[in-house]
Amino acid sequence: MSDKSFLAWPFFEAKHRKLSEQLEAWCRAELPRDHSDVDATCIQLVRDLGKAGFLEGTAGEHIDVRSLCLIRETLARHDGLADFAFAMQGLGTGAISLYGSDEQKQWLDKTRRGEALSAFALSEPRSGSDVAQLDTTAERDGDSYRINGEKTWISNGGIADIYTVFARTGEGPGAKGLSAFLVPADTPGLEVRERLESVAPHPLARLGFNDMVLPASALIGQPGQGFRIAMSVLDVFRSTVGAAALGFARRALEESLSRSRSRELFGATLSDLQMVQGHLADMALNVDAAALLVYRAAWTKDQGAERVTREAAMAKLFATDQAQQVIDQAVQLHGGDGVRKGHIIESLYREIRALRIYEGASDVQKVVIARSMLAEE
């Protein structure tokens, strides 16, 4: 049974404890799912999460980040693909929630009900964490924009119903000349050029834009606001990446405790060996420290902070890096089973690695943290 004592921390309210209880019951009944057809499973997970009401908080004017983190942590502990399906409904519509027009926000009813899947199209072949280097262009043509370029490693690429696409509109150099657009999946000129496979089974794709024409009403916010919009969205959702990592780490610790109590070695159980006890203590320490940083960042945002760039970067960096260590140690404690295909520890090992890269790689988070401190007087 997963440790729930952290729910008594002052970061949480009664509504969060109730949400955790309801979601835990749903997960035990519904997860894990078969991953043999990732696209179909992901689509069905979104439908089911929507019907159960767990997508309600992924979009809207007032997003409760603590709830998002609790949901991601719980889903990740049960099934990595379920966490992925949930996360993209929020990240993909974040720009619309924060800056969208009334017309654009009509999509949010569908995404919250699980009737439409969303995607966040930011990364490109030449620019990942360095958003200012985007090459995709959106040229104004009367009452329209003509978009050309390419995006890659786009989560939900190929199965999403709407994409938030960032492109260069040229109002200024670098980050000052970017804008964001809402792009329905059936827009002529939008191409799924390649489906991508990664170590963890997620729907990913390389997208192309070939003279794709959008009405001016597809612009999210104002021209040249794209960088600000992207950073604002990441400010909300980056700490939830740390929460997913926390869920993976908690599951690895749970499995390791069970293994240590039942596995015999040299006439005793693993749990009787002081070295194993030391490893378990290190794992527990990393889990709790990560949880404190994740929920500190979420609580700070929920208290009305305009930006939590440093707090979210710290949470994402520490939680993902430490989860990698916790899971690696779990592999050691499980021996051959830890690398056996299909074993829960093997799947956690594959799931955690990408989290240290997407939404800002670990080294980039260090730069973000350092710059925020240096900017202070």
Image (tube, rainbow, N blue to C red):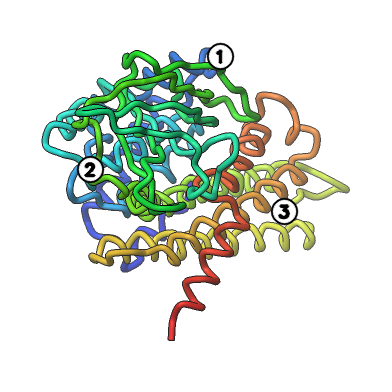
Helix, strand or loop under label 3? helix
N-terminal of the pair, mark 2 or mark 3, is: 2
Determine the residue located farthest toward the right in the rendered image.
266
Q: Earlier in the sequence, mark 3 or mark 1?
A: 1
Name the front one of labels 2 and 1. 2
Instruction: Note whether residue 91 is visible.
Output: yes
In this rendering, would 24 be left or right of 128? left
Q: Position of residue 103 (x, y in %)?
A: 13, 31
Q: Which residue is mark 1?
A: 36
State whether residue 61 is above or below residue 184: below
Question: What is the three-letter code of the residue carrying label 3?
Answer: Ser
The residue depicted at 68 percent of the width and 47 percent of the height is 261
Where is residue 277 shown, x and y percent of the image?
72, 60
From the viewer's perspective, tell me whether residue 348 is left or right of residue 83: right
Query: Which quarter of the figure is the C terminus placed in?
Result: bottom left
Q: Which residue is mark 2?
A: 97
SS class of the residue under badge 1? loop
Amino acid of disc 1: Ser
Q: How many angstroms separate mark 2 from mark 3 (CA)?
A: 49 Å
Residue 70 visible, this orientation: no
On residue 271, the disc is 3
Residue placed most toward the observer, 368 or 79 = 368
Give above or below for 149 relative to 24: above
Foreground label between 2 and 3:
2
Comparing 236 with 189, the one in front is: 189
Residue, far left = 102
* Location of residue 197 in the rendering, given as x and y in whole percent from the top left corner: 61, 23
Q: State whether residue 134 is above or below residue 374.
A: above
Measure the alpha-carbon separation of dots 3 and 1.
Answer: 35 Å
Q: How far separated are the C-alphas under marks 2 and 1? A: 33 Å
Q: Residues within 10 Å of mark 2 (few under 14, many from 20)?
A: many
